[in-house]
Image (cartoon, rainbow, N blue to C red):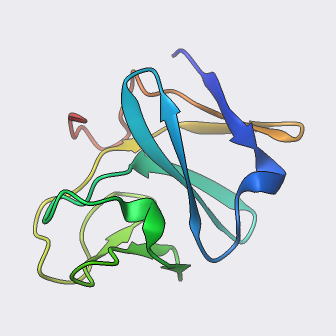
Amino acid sequence: MTFERACALADVPTDEALAVTIDRYDVAIARDGEEVFALQDLCSHAAVSLSEGEVANCTIECWLHGSTFDLRTGKPTTFPATEPVATFPVEVRGDDVYVDVETTLNGVTPT
């Protein structure tokens, strides 16, 4: 695994996501309680940025059509999305968040 620094932990809001670019991928970093998650910042339904949506109850909502995705698995939990988004391994090291975009946790190939 190749982890790269994505952001400072303090930069990740608790009810929103933070958009970052790692290598060639746009990634949404989100927090639910003490857990930090990373997923591709692209809704599988409408190809818009997920990081612009709200984070609650371990899900992120697409701002355009209201689809929600599980932060742990990337699977859609409400329609209209039916396809998952890629999720990436995350490590919190001290005050920083590191993400490995070369590996996906759920087997979805990022675009």
* Residue at far top of view: 2
Answer above or below: position of 34 versus 57: above
Which residue corresponds to the image point at 26% horizontal and 63% vertical from the top-left?
Answer: 75
- Determine whether, in the image, residue 42 is placed left or right of residue 35: left
Answer above or below: position of 6 versus 30: above
- Determine whether, in the image, residue 33 is placed left or right of residue 75: right
Which residue corresponds to the image point at 11% horizontal and 80% vertical from the top-left?
Answer: 80
In the rendered image, the quadrant that contains the C terminus is top left
Q: Quadrant of residue 107?
A: top left
Viewer-closest of 78 and 52: 52
Answer above or below: position of 1 versus 89: above
Viewer-closest of 1 and 47: 47
Which residue corresponds to the image point at 37% horizontal and 51% vertical from the top-left?
Answer: 41
Which residue corresponds to the image point at 53% horizontal and 82% vertical from the top-left?
Answer: 57
* Residue at far right of view: 94
Percent position of residue 27, x then y: 45, 43
Q: Quadrant of residue 52?
A: bottom left
Q: Quadrant of residue 46?
A: bottom left
Percent position of residue 78, x then y: 22, 83
Percent position of residue 39, x then y: 42, 49
Percent position of residue 28, x then y: 48, 52
Would you say residue 37 is visible in this rendering? yes
